[in-house]
Image (cartoon, helix red, strand yellow):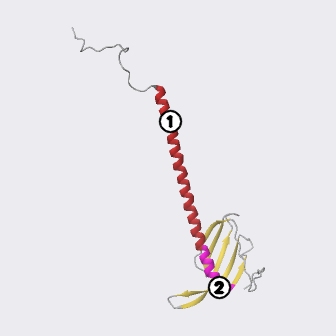
Amino acid sequence: MASPLHTRSHNLKGSEKSGFTLLEVMMVTFISSFVFAGVLSAYIFLGRGLAREANEESLESRGRLALFWVTQDVSTAFSISAENPGTNTTGTQFVLSVPIYDPSSNTSQVHTVTYACDWSQGPTLGVLQRQVDNGTPLVLLTNLSNFSFGYYDLTGTPVVAPNS
């Protein structure tokens, strides 16, 4: 016969229960899902904020580059004319005659610098380009909603009809 110390009691009344109840597990899952959703939304919010800031920095940088080229060319130009190329009116341009320094020959030569705004992609997708003589155009700005250029005579009066 087995001694009582080696037998296992199948009576649950006197034993302790261990583990979690279904209600406790469901409450922990519910609370954890709220914490996880909060962390995930904060992560998405920060990601969007960083992307927005990077886009603003890029836009500011491209704007400064465009302003640099226009300012440099207009300030040294001795002739300007505005044109509307072709009959399809998909773009407008202004042409500057600008002396550009050539370091190889140590002289300045007159070049034609053309700023053209192309609206062929749509009314809010204008592209501003700078082209020196017949070289490759440099894209300065994209996705423009409008573009205008005006200039004044020596007395400060706006010039209505473009002329050289």
Q: Nearer the viewer, mark 1 or mark 2?
A: 1
Q: Is residue 48 left or right of residue 5?
A: right
Number of other residues with Cα within 10 Å of mark 2, as a class: few under 14, some 14 to 19, many 20 or more: some
Location of residue 103 in the rendering, given as x and y in whole percent from the top left corner: 51, 88
From the viewer's perspective, is residue 25 above or below residue 12? below
Q: Secondary structure at mark 1?
A: helix
Q: Amino acid at mark 1?
A: Ile
Q: Which is nearer the N-term, disc 1 or disc 2?
A: 1
Viewer-nearest residue: 161 or 155: 155
Query: In the rendered image, which quarter contains the N terminus?
Result: top left
Q: Which mark is residue 31?
A: 1
Asked if marks 1 and 2 touch (Cβ < 8 Å), the reply is: no
Q: At 57% from the left edge and 62% from the top edge, which residue is drawn?
A: 55
Number of other residues with Cα within 10 Å of mark 1, as a class: few under 14, some 14 to 19, many 20 or more: few
Q: Residue 76 lies in what quarter of the image?
A: bottom right
Tell me where the magenta segment starts and ends, as one range: 66-79
Q: Is residue 29 left or right of residue 13?
A: right
From the viewer's perspective, is residue 113 above or below residue 108? above
Q: Amino acid at mark 2?
A: Ala
Location of residue 102 in the rendering, given as x and y in whole percent from the top left corner: 53, 87
Viewer-nearest residue: 123 or 46: 46
Query: In the rendered image, which quarter contains the C terminus?
Result: bottom right
Q: Estimate the spatial distance between the alpha carbons at disc 1 and disc 2, rounded to whole Å.
A: 69 Å
Residue located beneath label 2 in the image: 77
In magenta segment, residue 77: yes
Q: Secondary structure at mark 2?
A: loop
In magenta segment, residue 2: no
Q: At 65% from the left edge and 76% from the top edge, which residue is drawn?
A: 115
Q: Is residue 87 left or right of residue 49?
A: right
